[in-house]
Amino acid sequence: MLFSEQNFRRRGEFSGSIEVICGSMFSGKTEELIRRLKRAQIAKLNVEIFKPRTDNRYHETNIVSHDANSIVSTPVESSSAILLLGANTQVVGIDEAQFFDDQLPEVCNKLAVKGVRVIVAGLDMDFAGKPFGPIPAVMAVAEHVTKVQAVCVCCGNPALYSYRTVLNDSMILVGEKESYEPRCRACYHVGNNCGAS
């Protein structure tokens, strides 16, 4: 049976919601996710954090930001595993959500309907400037969307694109500064001629 947010409040339970933190690489998405999750932990809420098993750039289990802040998480193969492992939880954090399957929006909705605060972080666009994975669909059903921006390495303007600097056409290429750089719209479309080192 589905309960409205008003019913959750009347029954004195935690009100469910979906929050999305999105933007380009190096924009502070994971940093903001960690900040929100640590605040939930300080408030003594039951918090569970998940990331895709494929993302092990910094650590096998922890979520780690580019600034080396970290928080313990559980790597999972699919979004459906979040439903099983996130039972009896008040806050669920999901990092690198663009790498999850298309069931992620449904998983987030199911958790929110159960009264869970779901915080999702991920790239909203791929290296080709196209909507990335399930992020747009999660954004569509979210109560709150925060779009963060990096700084363009070419001109210093706000950057919303992740420009791939290596020759590789694979949709998924897990990488760092050796493979990507943040760029504004103009410098992204100029390509390698922007003068960045």
Image: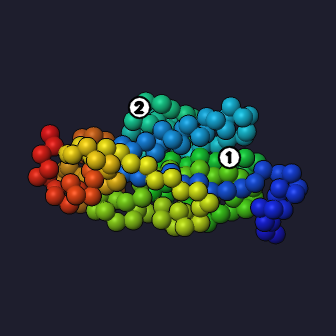
What element does badge 2 sit on?
A: loop
List x then y, in percent, for residue 2.
79, 68
Q: Nearer the viewer, residue 197 or 147?
A: 147
Quarter of the image with the C terminus is top left
Mark closest to the chain's N terminus, 1 or 2: 2
Looking at the image, which residue is at 34% across and 59% down?
A: 126
Q: Residue furthest bottom?
A: 1
Q: Residues within 10 Å of mark 1 (few under 14, many from 20)?
A: many
Please name the residue shown 44% across and 36% down the image: 65
* Relative side of 62 to 165, left or right: right
Q: Nearer the viewer, residue 190 or 86?
A: 190
Q: Is residue 61 visible?
A: no
Query: For residue 158, which numbered disc appears in the image?
Result: none
- Confirm whether residue 24 shows in the render: yes
Of helix, strand and loop, which one carries label 1? strand
Q: Does residue 187 lie above or below 50 as drawn?
A: below
| Relative to 73, residue 186 above or below | below
- The residue drawn where x is 16% and y is 58% is 190
Numbered badge on residue 67: 2
For this rendering, which residue is in front, 84 or 41? 41
| Residue 141: percent from left, percent from top | 59, 66
Q: Amino acid at mark 2?
A: Asp
Q: Which residue is at the front of the view, 1 or 29?
A: 29
With 167 as the anchor, is 96 left or right in this view?
Answer: right
Q: Amino acid at mark 1?
A: Val
Residue identifier under label 1:
91
Tag 2: Cα neighbours inside 10 Å, few (<14), some, or many (≥20)? few
Q: Residues under labels 1 and 2: Cα distance?
A: 23 Å
Q: Which residue: 41% across, 31% down?
A: 67
